[in-house]
Image (cartoon, rainbow, N blue to C red):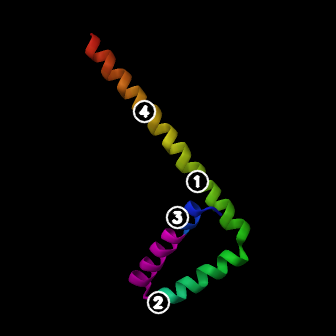
């Protein structure tokens, strides 16, 4: 797991801790402990989840770049007409 993966994982865990604390009155220390144990016991699942999430983000970035280029082309074409 590289630094970006670690940071993203931490942010996701923090969001979960906040949501569970707010909506289910579960103390953050409990969520953190359970989360860490789940990651230890289900390492393959979390690695696959991270890869899948990263791939979806990459795919979305590609679609955004393509859309940006299409929009730029359409604006340029519209200015020529």
Residue 59 rendering spot, x and y as whole percentages: 55, 43
Magenta part of the chain: 10-27
Residue drawn 42% across the image and 88% down it? 25
Q: Are marks 2 and 3 in contact (CB under 8 Å)?
A: no
Q: Which mark is residue 67?
A: 4
Q: Do the residues labelled 4 and 1 touch (CB within 8 Å)?
A: no
Label 3: which residue? 8
Residue drawn 42% across the image and 33% down it? 67
Q: Do the residues labelled 4 and 3 touch (CB within 8 Å)?
A: no
Q: Tell which circle, 4 or 2, labels the residue nearer the N-terminal end.
A: 2
Label 2: which residue? 27
Residue drawn 32% across the image and 19% down it? 76
| Residue that sits furthest to the top in the current view | 81
The local crowd at label 4, few if under 14, some if 14 to 19, many if 20 or more residues have their Cα within 10 Å, is few
Q: Tell which circle, 1 or 3, labels the residue nearer the N-terminal end.
A: 3
Q: Is residue 80 above or below residue 4?
A: above
How far is mark 1 from mark 3, CA to CA? 10 Å
Number of numbered discs on residues: 4
Q: Which secondary structure lies at badge 2?
A: loop
How far is mark 2 from mark 3, CA to CA? 21 Å
Which is closer to the viewer, label 1 or label 2? Answer: 1
Residue 30 rendering spot, x and y as whole percentages: 54, 89
How far is mark 4 from mark 3, CA to CA? 26 Å
């Amino acid at each position: 797991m590289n630094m970006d993966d670690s940071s993203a994982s931490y942010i996701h865990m923090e969001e979960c801790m906040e949501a569970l604390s707010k909506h289910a009155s579960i103390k953050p220390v409990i969520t953190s402990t359970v989360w860490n144990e789940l990651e230890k016991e289900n390492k393959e699942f979390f690695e696959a989840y991270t890869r899948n999430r990263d791939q979806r983000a990459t795919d979305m970035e590609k679609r955004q770049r393509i859309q940006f280029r299409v929009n730029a082309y359409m604006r340029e074409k519209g200015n020529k007409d």
